[in-house]
Amino acid sequence: MAHPLLKDSPGMKKLLLGNEAIVRGAIEAGIQVVTCYPGTPSSEVPDTFFRLSPEGDFTFEYSVNEKVALEVGGGASLAGAMTMTTMKHVGVNVAADPLMTLAYTGTPGGMVLLSADDPGCHSSQNEQDNRYYARLAGMPCLEPSTAQEAKDMTRDGLNMSREMSAPVLLRTTTRVNHLRGPVEYGEITKLAPAEGFKKNPAQFVPIPAFARRMHVDLLEKLEKLREMAETSRYNKISGNGKIGIVASGICRAYLADALVDTGLTDKFKILELGFTYPLPAKMITEFISSVEKVVVLEELEPFLENELRVLAQKNSITVEIIGKENKLLPLNDEYSTLNITAIIREVLGLEAEKTESCVAEEGLPTRPPNLCAGCTHRAAYYAVKKVFGPDAVCSSDIGCYTLGILPPLNAADFLLCMGSSISAGSGAAKAAGQTVVGFIGDSTFFHSGITGLVNAVFNQHNILLVILDNSTTAMTGHQPNPGVETTMLGSNPAQIDMEAIVRGCGVNEVRTVSPLNQKAITNALEELKGISGVRVLIAKDPCPLFARRTLKKAPGRTAYVENQSEEVLKVMEELACPAFEKTANGVEINEILCSGCMLCLQLTKDIKARKRSS
């Protein structure tokens, strides 16, 4: 029986996650190739494609990084296949090199790049606004505000890309990716198989002589796309009044709620922009000419606001533009119905309404994210701190192991980006001669750590790299990577040997141990501490959640405190394992939370193991 997302049932309505709606939109367009590197808030899109791939009419791959994903997707589009590539916003930084060139060569089969932005840094190291990539590359940008639009814009973006031979940026934000809403299905298009690449070096090989003409062609294409934006159903004007509001992305949904909640719908003239680049200049010019002042609602950068100011100046339009320039709206974080309500009341000269605050009262304990009970990374961090002490500099990387920053582990001193632990750690060690221990996960190592390791060997840096190999891409939802033995769909027939890769990069001093064996990992670290140059410890043991869910390895034992002692209290404080609890009776271990890793047993004789109760 076909998965609901694969059913050709026009008119059927389903409650979908925004990311699921994106998948449905691609299926309706006739998607043929999907590539990705998982990253929150985009992860459910490729994960859903992955689950559908056995019965879907498309091919799917988890690529090793975003650049590779876009290159594979770009090549598929050049060969005539309708293609989608997905990633989070910082992934586009990695993929920017091929992206700029794809805008020149075009995408004959059609190609949508999903950039899932993250205002508020819910799961990211920055809040960058990727609409600027659309402008930089010269590609159309679509911004949905509802699940229905997420589906429709994906479908229409793919069709637009195929028609215009131009890559399209689908820019979502966390709230759009993770909202749920009603979605009416459309018809599924059945495309003919890709015809294959048709040779035309002047179009597809951007040597300078050809690239100069390609740029001219791109500028002409952008003018045609601008005319499409003028009549797009995703750009619309409604309402009356002498005060205008221009809104894009999820701000359109917040605005709709705010107007209904306040009963001020009839006070404003609204311009909703879903097709935000190239901008419909004529529509915007006419709109700002019809009002006395304009409020611009957009998260992060003043992308639209600055364009409105330019159009007003070019056309000698006297209009007050209210936004980030005059500090009334922030340049950071997410917007909400509350702050949009506040600004629309302010521009009308109304008093601010008293609202319920979502901010926690002072004095309440916080609940920061923590490494899971039994996490193998905790065992590795504990051993490194034991051997190297608190003075070693810890160069960290992107993954759930970044949570090692928290006390008492304190195992993350600086972090730049995916794969940077090796390169940045090498630089820190070279600059000041400090002892540097770099930490990187298995998926991140395959993503962008290999080049840093080759560089460290070539330039004879002095760094100890600990590869935290937990056999999965844990942080984003247990997606496979080249080194895993087993995936959600079964065994991996092309597993890459991590130690062989490390040795192939020129590293001679390599140790592979289980971090849950504290004696083995401590001995290995002591050996490597006495060696200079590039050396690597592979701390290999599956993520306990992955082991239970995918590998079907349920722990048969649980730890318990046999005797209350200072040793037990010390172990609890030094490990900070969530399974430990301090009660009126002393230290206890929660059997439900305990993963059975037995790390604590190795640190004190007062903790024992017993058979887990059913």
Image (cartoon, helix red, strand yellow):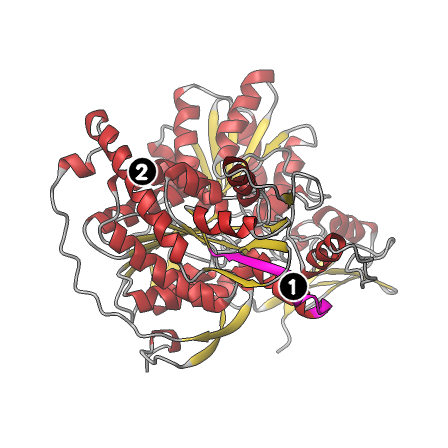
Does the magenta-highlighted stretch encompass residue 266? yes
Could you tell me the amino acid type at mark 1? Cys
Q: Position of residue 54 (x, y in %)?
A: 30, 69
Please tell me whether residue 426 is drawn above or below residue 384 in the rendered image.
above
The boundaries of the magenta stretch are 261-274
Between 517 and 228, the one lying in front of the other is: 228
Classify residue 607 as left or right of residue 381.
right
Q: Tell me what residue is drawn at x 57 percent, y 17 percent.
A: 431
Which numbered disc, 1 or 2, marks the residue that appears first in the sequence? 2
Task: Please state, as top left, top right, bottom left or bottom right, where the C terminus lies in the image.
Answer: bottom right
The single residue placed furthest to the left in the displayed view is 199
Dot 1 surroundings within 10 Å: few (below 14), some, or many (20 or more)? Answer: many
Q: Tell me what residue is drawn at x 33 percent, y 38 percent.
A: 98
Between 176 and 457, the one lying in front of the other is: 176
Numbered circle sitting on residue 90: none
Q: Which residue is mark 2?
A: 219
Please tell me whether residue 520 is drawn above or below residue 528 in the rendered image.
below
Between 253 and 497, the one lying in front of the other is: 253
Classify residue 97 as left or right of residue 587.
left
Classify residue 349 as left or right of residue 482.
right
* Residue 605 showing in the rendered view: no
Please tell me whether residue 128 is drawn above or below residue 438 in the rendered image.
below
Q: Position of residue 574 (x, y in %)?
A: 73, 46
Could you tell me the amino acid type at mark 2? Leu
Classify residue 510 as left or right of residue 84.
right
Q: Which residue is mark 1?
A: 594
Q: Tell me what residue is drawn at x 64 percent, y 49 percent.
A: 292
